[in-house]
Structure formats: structure tokens, C-alpha cells
Amino acid sequence: MKILATAPIDKTAVDILAPYGEIIVAPDDNEETLVRLAAESEVFVVRGVAKITARVIEASPNLKVIGRTGVGINNIDIEAATARGIPVVFTPGANARAVAEAAMSFILALAKRVPYWDRQTKTDQWNTRYDSMNDDLEGETLGIIGFGNIGQQLARLAGPFDMKLLACDPYASADRAHELGVSLVSLSELLQQSKYISLHTTLTPETEGMINASNLQQLQHGSYLVNLSRGEAIDSLDSILDALNDGRLAGAGLDVFVPEPVDSSHPIFSHPNFLSAPHVASLTHKAVDTIHLWMANDIKAVLEGTPPKRLVNPEVLKQA
């Protein structure tokens, strides 16, 4: 058996999957490359932004299972896989704590102006400490857009800072929100009332571009925006830059972009109140190990004819 990985995978997964066959890492994520390698592969391990299109799936006549290292499945043609009866396993919740911690880190770094003061100190600008001040979290409102595993973890982390907590998510449990001290509100209410805003949505037609030039006009002056979900949740970097330039945003932090890798020549990357990272929020030792462990074990389950624990398309089991 040959196992095609779209990017290098963690040793945890290698140890579980290697007994089943040779693991081949694609040299790039171009569709033509994946189609060529798929022809002799029976397992796909999807890591990164590689697109597993219907064409890639159809190129693998003996494909048995697709494993995704993460929760985002928008780069896999689930309909094509399901039509072939191919299970797609993924790892929802495995990196929730890591991403929530990263979101809290972004919020703190922006509010306390950590990068700015670092630059000032290293360039002997000591007396600029008298020219501006940091922001507070205590008593301020944190609005969480998307109240799934990550959003709930962020609410737990923010609680000890004595922040008022809001969330926007039409599918959120009111009981769960109440348990965590969170008030569920509309997106408009959240944008208007929150000083700090953190995005943790999945990518759907409803969430694509949900933060845009129009509704960013609702922000209170001096707000902060963090996005560690999907780059598509924001309509464009121009909208964020405009809000930074006119003071609606006192700071913004993005870990996700469209496309990726992002073109860092965009003027937002020169803004002193913009903080960025290359889609690394979930890449902690524990999270990566857990993601690969869950994914590999579910691939193993499929190969051995037992039901996997985390399956995107459970209907394929009924087809079998």
C-alpha cells in the first residue's frame, strides 16, 4: 500500500501508518503532481493547503480513506469522496486549546503593545513611554465570533481577566453559553459592543466575508480584531487597513490569509499596529501530536474495517 501525504507528517502518525505501507510526501501541492501520485495511492493524508479535488480523487482507483490533519475540510471535495464511498476523517477539537491560547496571546500582545515597546527599547527610544499607554482587559468586552470548541476555550481563558463575554453563533447552545458566562448576540450587536473581537468560525458560504468594509463601520473607536479562523472570514486586507488608519481599530492580528502564503508587500504589513503570523496558531507540540494521533488512528480504523471516531461523511458507512 502507498500512503500519499501532501506535506510532511508528524512521527506519531508515521509510527501508526508505516506498518500499512510506504508513506510518500508530495514534492508540491499542484493538482497535476497530486493526480500523478494518487494513481498508486490507497490513502491520502491532507496537511496544509493542498486541494484534494474530484480529479485527484478519481485518479486513485484504489483509494480507501482520506485523513485531514485539522478541522478545515474546505480543500477536500467531500461530495466526490462520498460519491465514491470514501471516508474522510478529520480532527475537530484537537487543537482547540492551542488556538484559543494563541488568540489570547494576540489580544494581550496588541493591548499591551508588546511588539511596539520591544522595537522602542531596542532602538533606544526609552522616553516614548511617556507618549502613549497600553490598554486594559479588565471590564472590557470580548466578542467571540464562532462559539465552537475554540471559542468556548477562549471564553474560559478570558474569564479570569474579568471581561464581559459576548458570542455570535447561530448554532451555539444557550445552556453552554450561560454556563461559561457568555451572552449570545447578533453579529451587529457584537461588533458595536465589543472592544476586543476574535474570529473562530468555520468556512461556509455564510461566514465567507462576514467581516467586511460595511460592518466594520460599526466598530467603536479603538477596538481590536483578531482572526485565527479562516482568511476568507474577512473580505480583504484593505478593509482592515482602512479601520487601522482611521482609528476604528487600535490593533489587528491575523494568523490566516487569502491566499497563503500571503503577499507581504501589502501596505498593512507596514502598519505599526498590525500583528501577523504564518498560520501557526495550532502548531504547538501537544496540538500537532494530538492531531496526528487522532487522524492516524481513524485511518487505521478504516483500513481495519472498524468505524472511525471522527468522520466527516458518516453516510459512507451506510453505503458499505
Image: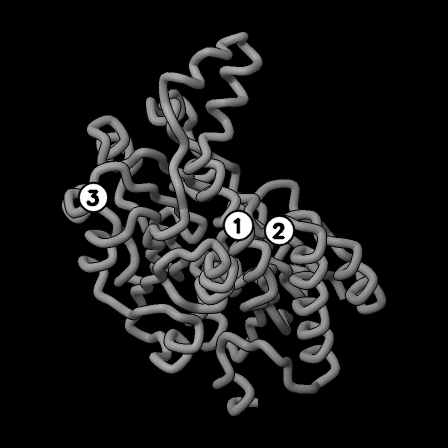
Regarding mark 3 in the picture, which secondary structure is present there?
A: loop
The first of marks 3 and 2 along the sequence is: 2
From the viewer's perspective, tell me whether residue 230 is left or right of residue 211.
right
* Residue denoted by label 1: 50
Seen at 18% across and 58% down, the residue is 188
| Residue lying furthest top | 124
At 35% from the left edge and 74% from the top edge, which residue is drawn? 172
The kind of residue tagged 2 is Thr
Task: Determine which residue is flagged by label 2.
Answer: 6
From what the image shows, is residue 174 above or below residue 162?
Answer: below
* Mark 3 and mark 2 residues within 8 Å of each other at the beta carbon: no
Tell me where residue 252 sits by quadrant: top left
Q: Residue 220's mark?
A: 3
- Residue neighbourhood size for the residue with mark 1, other residues' Cα within 10 Å, grouped as few (<14), some (14–19), many (≥20): some
**Disc 2 + disc 1, Cβ < 8 Å:** yes
70 or 42: nearer the eye? 70
Nearer the observer, disc 3 or disc 1?
Answer: 3
Mark 3 and mark 1 lie on one chain; the one further toward the N terminus is 1
Amino acid, disc 1: Ala
Q: Amino acid at mark 3?
A: Gln
